Image (spheres, coloured by chain):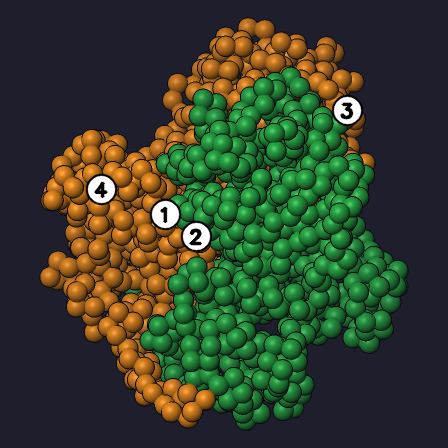
Chain colours: A orange, B green
Amino acid sequence: MIRIALAQMEVVPGRPDLNSAAMLAMIDEARAKKVEIVVFPEMAVPGYLLGDTWEQQAFLRDCEEYGRRIVAASRGLCVMFGNVGLDWAKRGDDGRVRKYNAFFVAQDGELLGGDHFPYPFRIKSLQPNYREFDDSRHFYSLRKLALDLGRQPAELLRPVAVTIGGRKVNIGCILCEDGWSDDYGLKPVSALKNNGAELIVNISSSPFTLGKNNKRNRVFSKEAQENGIPLAYVNNVGLQNNGKTVYTFDGFSTVYDGCGRIVAFCPPFAPAMMTVDLDLDISGENLAPVTTVPDDQGIPIVFQTLRYGTAKFLDQVGLKKVVIGVSGGIDSALAAALYTNILGPSNVLLVNLPSVYNSATTKNLAEELAKNLGCLYAVVPIQDAVDFTVNQFRQTEIVNMRDGSSSRLTVTPFMTENIQARDRSARVLAGLAAAFGGGFTCNANKSELTVGYATLYGDQAGFLAALADLWKHQVYAVAGYINDVVYGCEVIPASVFRLVPSAELSPEQAVDEGKGDPLVYPYHDYLFRSFMEWWDRATPEDILAWYAAGELEAKLGCENGLVARLFPSAAEFIADLEKWWRLYTGLAVAKRIQAPPVLAVSRRAYGFDHREAQNGPHFTAAYHKLKEKLLGATR
Amino acid sequence: MIRIALAQMEVVPGRPDLNSAAMLAMIDEARAKKVEIVVFPEMAVPGYLLGDTWEQQAFLRDCEEYGRRIVAASRGLCVMFGNVGLDWAKRGDDGRVRKYNAFFVAQDGELLGGDHFPYPFRIKSLQPNYREFDDSRHFYSLRKLALDLGRQPAELLRPVAVTIGGRKVNIGCILCEDGWSDDYGLKPVSALKNNGAELIVNISSSPFTLGKNNKRNRVFSKEAQENGIPLAYVNNVGLQNNGKTVYTFDGFSTVYDGCGRIVAFCPPFAPAMMTVDLDLDISGENLAPVTTVPDDQGIPIVFQTLRYGTAKFLDQVGLKKVVIGVSGGIDSALAAALYTNILGPSNVLLVNLPSVYNSATTKNLAEELAKNLGCLYAVVPIQDAVDFTVNQFRQTEIVNMRDGSSSRLTVTPFMTENIQARDRSARVLAGLAAAFGGGFTCNANKSELTVGYATLYGDQAGFLAALADLWKHQVYAVAGYINDVVYGCEVIPASVFRLVPSAELSPEQAVDEGKGDPLVYPYHDYLFRSFMEWWDRATPEDILAWYAAGELEAKLGCENGLVARLFPSAAEFIADLEKWWRLYTGLAVAKRIQAPPVLAVSRRAYGFDHREAQNGPHFTAAYHKLKEKLLGATR
């Protein structure tokens, strides 16, 4: 029997001083509880997503110093924790000091090493270089080390012998990805079991994304069961970011018994120290297995992530107040309800910014929303400022300094649409936010961001795009959940849900006449998702092939019959497809480069998890061929 | 004797259709010139910097298809080129189809393989995962392949036998980084020489950065000389980007003889096909070595890169006209001269945007600049709009919807500064740019970007930040070069160089009274460079240690005696250091996330070459200790 504590701490990225202080307090708590092994997450000392802070030698020395203090504090118990492991004598692939993503095991003030390994720490076997991760940029890998030593990686995976109750217990120490051995040739869990491990401890720093936990539970349960070895997984909570993309960490630290059953888990999105008495010999028999784990896919967890991530982000950047432009539409209504739930109504200023194109319908809905939430509310009409600007432009003399001739510019209605959008955000909201002592929010959703259906320095601006990883149909669903569950009453007026989505920037977007966005969300949401979120990215070539085969709706997961209803002919279908693909890979990229940070929810968010270049659209040779065939057939 | 053609083509990223068409034309030209081997750059078919376009299977199939057309065109000569190499049956580390950064050798319509290697192409040995590169995200490495095959990487490096004039010539095929073997344990050039290579061909896709070419020439000359083997290096020209950072490719394809002498090179920044008759037996003896290669560090090459990169970027995004806000200061004057040199004066609209704080001095300088350049010119005063905004804010009733009470907001002078900056850019320049049919430029320099000394949606906005990789002192130097060399007359008025740098947003920044920016560029330029550009990033801990040791100016490379003059006491020095470090790692990060694309010039530009997280400032334990000691000593 081992008493093990899962220290699901909040890791503050880039702050070894704060993290080590928190760890020292938790070690004292563990000692008081007679814990034999206390386990902290991966990179518990430095944090994980730090960008090129890893290139600062002073920072590395600092992490080493704070790590030493943790080791020194391990009197009377075993402390396991993640930190950067350094080999000052060797260089990494980038020519800098060699760094490892390392697992430290300390007991009674000493690091427990192993004579078969060149360092007094273990290292991560499988480094992620996909999605938002780029471990190989900073950390030397086990595969490279094995090659240098003339060994196979599996030979280097040996357990650490920890003394528990007078006897040596062999513990297999792995990091995060190492648990996912089914995706790779290397199988760290079985390698360690074969080398004598009696327990696997997996320390992790794994951001939340929809559906991740169920998948992890399946994989880890299978690993534990197939190898007949219990597995303790410890993940951190908190918020970390890569600049453009902001990730929540849900913790969800879990213990699996040797039969692969979940015997305990920490609540998601909350710091915790969970103590488990684990019997290594009769695996799991003395612990009642947990049968249900929280949902990790549905709207409740989406809301929980949004709330946790937004609240932490506000904290991290030091904002206590926000200004939100509310149009009467669903996106800004959701933003208003979310921020009010976090900050309280007296710290949220909702601003309606009508021009001549805004209907009484939406203006009234914006006010009703503010009333329901009990926020601060202001109406700042923009028409005078917009008229001033348009007139100023029309009257401005453009002088040709070569010959002294002069001319005037023309302002079209489309230009005026963008002038309105920028007037609202860059003139009013940014200025009011400063005067209110806060920031202003970007309420753009993922569908808009995909094709750049937002104005740069206009509605795309703000300190955080909290909703920009939600497709439009998810925006509606979360808004409904907020009414039904979070507030338990209709804070977002029912009419907002029934309104046609519209920017209300011109007579062509008059909501009372049922006119609005050019996006047909029930189709385009799913089309865009296939371009952007799918593991194997769909492209026009794939879409057209599925269309030709009559299986597009089934593939995309949208409503059956929708495509034929929207596009009576192949020519119309193709024109729509090409229009949005050109925007997605064209102008929208330019806009995203200057977009606010995006809070990640899905399995792929814009920003660092979707690397993109401003290269413009391309259609493959096979696409052109298929298109010709289809257009020939329908003409 | 081999007649080899270095096909220094412009590679269009993401456009295998365009690239292969250009290659087919160059192959015909080579055949007509009786060339025996024509060599194209690394990733000549797809382009190199493509973000996650590599995850689109349709794109990969497309590259394969266009690659087959190149192979088919190799009748009567040998064609060497870079393309993505695919193993559809195996997975990469990310679980997707396995991709290689590959070197293809085709002759008479067939790919030349080698029975010792599992693929009919060579692969890159040393993958860069530093700076703007992340090869391991997409491409499987030689080290991993070697480990899978149970071999050492060097064993897999064997030359390809090409038939030239009836005899087999063994050619060592490497890619880019493979030439830099002195930085790594693996030495591809000597491995290939040991395995029988008579000539090394290095195909590359290497962005220009200051000082890179001289370094490459040193390293490659040494490799050629030490191994006694000639080396042909072929790099592409053109422009590629990673979203936030835009890179020029200078080509500079070079042939080194077996004594390490440069015998020929292509002009930088221009497409070229250079034919060289190379004698493999008497290395270099029959070719006169080139003794001088163009400067790669000075101001002329900085200007050339800026001009090439800006022109190509305009082309790529389809802009033929620009609007530039001109303040009378040096940054906007340089931007005006640069864009006018590229687009011609009738496509450049210079706009002066005075408020009450702008002096007659700067207004006159802006007009004089426009006159000298012969551009279009307009004056758009912003004071009325700013006053309108401030008054509208002051009059806006903020209603508390909970109790119906109402209040007003206060607008401080600092807020008004930012209102001015946003009014200029988001209201006027963005609107005028649309009406003019172009984009508007961001004129921020690297010193400003480092500490966020620019307003978001204000002077930090624009379609491209062409000058944002230049420190302030480089801005002056390039501006001087433009007068002296490019135009050969004073297009930028001499007074602009003498003016104190100032934003002119308040009475505290009155230029005629010699008041201006809080940045002391002759010191802060160099301090910031040490934080940001240095290979081993300097931090406050390092800076303070050098300050204490009296070696700071020597380390930073700034004027001797400057530090003591600026900061009479350690306390003042420390306050300044902490202030800028907090901004650099704090608010400035938030601003950079929303900054325009930055044109890279230096060895580290903001954006993808400087990964950063919005984590806020940290000071190490050693820093705090040193600070206490210093403050104790001076008190």
The label shown at residue A628 is: 4
Which of marks 4 and 3 precedes in the sequence? 3
Residue drawn where x is 36% and y is 47% of the image: A618
The amino acid type of the residue labelled 3 equals: Pro
Residue A523: x %, y % from top left? 22, 43
**Residue for badge 1:** A618
Residues at circles 3 and 4 in contact by the CB criterion of under 8 Å: no
Query: At x 86% / y 62%, what residue is drawn?
Result: B551
Q: CA distance from mark 3 to mark 2?
A: 45 Å
Looking at the picture, does residue B147 appear above or below residue B435? above
Mark 2 neighbour class, 10 Å CA radius: few under 14, some 14 to 19, many 20 or more? many
Is circle 3 on the same chain as circle 2? yes
From the image, tell me which residue sits under label 2.
A615
Q: Residue furthest top?
A: A282
Q: Amino acid at mark 4?
A: Glu
**What is the three-letter code of the residue carrying label 2?**
Asn
- Counting the numbered discs, the total is 4
Circles 4 and 1: CB atoms closer than 8 Å: no
N-terminal-most mark, 1 or 3 = 3
Residue A361 shown left or right of residue A274 in the figure = left
- Residue at 17% x, 65% y is A508
Residue placed under numbered mark 3 in the picture: A118
Q: Are marks 1 and 2 in contact (CB under 8 Å)?
A: yes
State the image quarter where residue B423 is shown. bottom left
**Mark 3 — on which chain does it sit?**
A
Letter of the chain that mark 2 sits on in the rendering: A
Tag 3 near tag 2, CB within 8 Å: no
Give the mark toward the camera: 4 or 1: 4
Local secondary structure at mark 4: helix
